[in-house]
Image: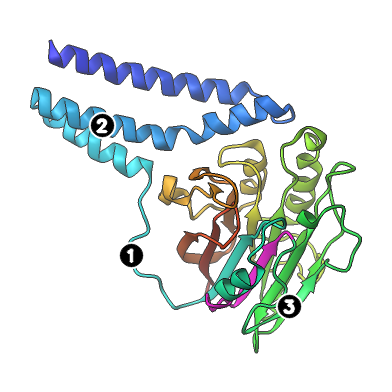
Amino acid sequence: MARMRGLAGFFVLLFGLLCAGGAAAICPEDVLWLSALRAVLLSLPRPAMLLFAVWGIWYWRRSSYKIGGVIALGALLLSGIPPLWPESSEGLLLVSANVQAYAEEQEELEMALGELGADVLITHEKRGERIPGMARVADNYQRDLPKPSHGEAVYCARGRFCDGAITEEYGAEGCAMPVALVRVEASMCVIGIHAPPPIPICSSGMTPYLEKVASNIEDGRMARAWGPCKEDDPVVVTGDLNYVPGSRAWRKLIDTGLRDPAVVQGIWANSWPAGGGWPMAPFFRLDHILVGDVDAHSLRYFGVPGADHRALRIRVELRD
């Protein structure tokens, strides 16, 4: 009897997960509440694996079937593998941080970012202007920004050769956002994104913004010159996409030949909400790193003083 109840519980969980996936597929991304529901449904499978793990342990203990232990272990791995391995010191250290323009603690933020020892740092939203040990090579702070949250800046370690630029704003009128571009050591293009948020006035802003970014990438390299970046440069795209893995926005970038090194980390790469006036309970992965024709390793997500998003850092290297 215990075995039958246990199997019934397993299939109920599985059926619920399949229904969530089907509902996510039909939810549009240009209607606010349906977009939010879609984000929840797309983010649900990884944490749901924890329920399968609990079921597997219960089934193993109650029924003494080894299959329960196997399912529990498999479910834990599918939920995500925490980055417990040591970080490498090889390659370019890239940091992307949504710093939340409306927070205080500016000096604390600047010190925290400076202590990372990044080679390239891209900040999304206008907060923090002097990062110790780094030079600001591009920003849009002097423009007439609609809101401080439209700020973008690129910093490079002193002595590192960088050429940066912040583009005009792309997207629907009233909620368009800029793109940060930086060419590092005349060999690699890093594209910093802060996509329009899925709020009512910006419901149609995501498509033109992502189309602009995606149109310049092919097979993980620059399809044409854009700002300081040159045709055929290998590409790294990073920043606040405001959508989760599996969304149409995320797939639009993946279809350009980029790959997602955070996929193995699962729930450990979730980045929002993470404080800054919100609960410290990251459920959604809104902040992404997508890499093209480069090697990437040592990915870590971490908290930033005053910010409601977790930032990320990663090592990237050109391929031989």
Report the front residue among 7 and 272.
272
Instruction: Place residue 63 in its image quadrant.
Output: top left
Q: Is residue 19 left or right of residue 182?
A: left
Callout 1–callout 3 Cβ contact below 8 Å = no
Element on which disc 3 rests: strand
Residue 230 forms part of the magenta stretch: no
Q: Which residues are magenta?
A: 114-125
Secondary element type, mark 1: loop
Classify 10 Å Cα crowding around label 1: few (below 14), some (14-19), many (20 and above): few
**Picture coordinates of residue 148, whole percent (x, y):** 79, 57
Local crowd at mark 3 within 10 Å, few (<14), some, or many (≥20)?
some
Look at the picture and state if 224 lies above or below 15: below
Residue 157 versus residue 152 in the image, above or below: below
Residue assigned mark 3: 136
Of pointers 1 and 2, the one earlier in the residue sequence = 2
In space, the residues marked 3 and 2 are separated at their CA atoms by 49 Å
Q: Which mark is residue 303?
A: none
Residue at (40% x, 70% y) in the render: 87
- Asked if residue 228 is positioned above or below residue 9 in the image, the reply reads below
Query: What is the quadrant of the N terminus in the image?
Result: top left
Give the residue number, with chain letter if any, for mark 1: 85
133 sits left or right of 30 in the view: left
Asked if disc 3 and disc 2 are in contact, CB closer than 8 Å, the reply is no
Indicate which disc residue 54 carries. 2
Q: Nearer the viewer, residue 223 or 109?
A: 109
- Residue kind at label 2, given as amino acid type: Val
